[in-house]
Amino acid sequence: MNKPLMAKATAVWLVDNTTLSFKQIGDFCGLHELEVQGIADGDVATGVKGFDPIASNQLDAEQITRGEADPAYVLKLKHNPAADGEEKRRGPRYTPLSKRQDRPAAILWLVKFHPELADAQISKLVGTTKPTIQAIRDRTHWNIGNIQPIDPVALGLAKQTELDAAVQKAAKKKSADGGVMSDDERRKLVSTETSLTMSDEPRLPTAIAGLENFSLTKDEDEKPQRDLDADTFFNLPDAEDDDEDDDN
């Protein structure tokens, strides 16, 4: 077992009761650093009661003290003999009853912002069925008019690390199949940590794209330019000039 029991509840307790960094808590609980930040901001694990890892004999208080003094210190889970030989449970992801009504919103978010993900990947991420995903893709879901896209990580249905891994896997598969990706799709396929450090790329407006090297022709370049000033616009012709024009 490489993470504590009730990992998200443990992360809630560590955020509320220690000054450990988000990375230290995420590494110990098997969560993404941004997911821990979401817990601190109140966007993730809302209503989850903290679980004390010291009282449950999963972490020593001395480790927390050392971790608070040294941000580079890595917390280590205490060995639990009862967990020896435990295998990862196989089967579909279990979604709590309180979060099952949020799955359509998460599916719509994934379909809208990550269309490269296969139905099987979406099903594994949020614990849903392929007919439900297809109904949302086709907009034939019975409640499609009231569904708003929401990030499944923010809803607590998936981990950021799992979403990043699924997106990267979809990118490799699309590249292997020879698919052509747009610039927006390429930016979506970058991991969250990388995208946060990327700077915005300067782009030319589409109306002038391709005119960077445009130059005037020789005739236009050599055409004399009139010097215009205020007098040119406000000085009216003399009356004598008007009379001459009338005679002509």
Image (tube, rainbow, N blue to C red):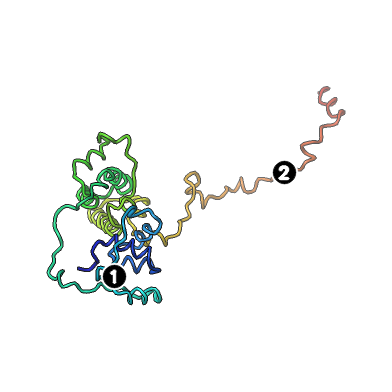
Q: Secondary structure at mark 2?
A: loop
Asked where in the image residue 6 lies, by quadrant, the reply is bottom left
From this view, report whether residue 183 is shown above or below residue 78: above
Q: Residue at x 49, y 50 (%)?
A: 204
Count up the numbered dots: 2
Check disc 2 and report the residue beneath it. 226
- Mark 1 — residue? 54
Q: Gap between marks 1 and 2, in whole Å?
A: 85 Å
* Frontmost residue, 144 versus 101: 101
Q: Nearer the viewer, residue 82 or 242?
A: 82
Give the mark toward the camera: 1 or 2. 1
Is 165 left, or right, of 237 in this rendering? left
Instruction: Count residues near mark 1 (Cα–Cα under 10 Å), then give few for <14, some for 14-19, many for 20+.
Output: few
| Image x and y of residue 236, in percent | 81, 32
Residue flagged by tag 2: what amino acid is it?
Arg
Residue 152 placement (x, y as % from top left): 30, 50
Most extreme residue toward the front, as rendered?
55
Asked whether the beta carbons under mark 1 and mark 2 sit within 8 Å of each other, the answer is no
The percent coordinates of residue 226 (x first, y second) are 72, 43
Q: Quadrant of residue 146?
A: top left
Residue 169 screen position, x and y as percent: 25, 57
Q: Farthest residue toward the top?
A: 247
Q: Quadrant of residue 192?
A: bottom left
In this view, which residue lies farthest toward the left?
Answer: 85
- Check the image and report above or below for 194 versus 75: above
Q: Amino acid at mark 1?
A: Ile
Which element is circle 1 on? loop
For label 2, the crowd category at 10 Å Cα-Cα, with few meaning under 14, some 14 to 19 and many 20 or more, is few
Identity of the residue drawn at 16% across and 52% down? 92
The correct choice, above or below, for 239 with respect to 118 in the image is above
Q: Earlier in the sequence, mark 1 or mark 2?
A: 1
Q: Could you tell me which quadrant the C terminus lies in?
A: top right
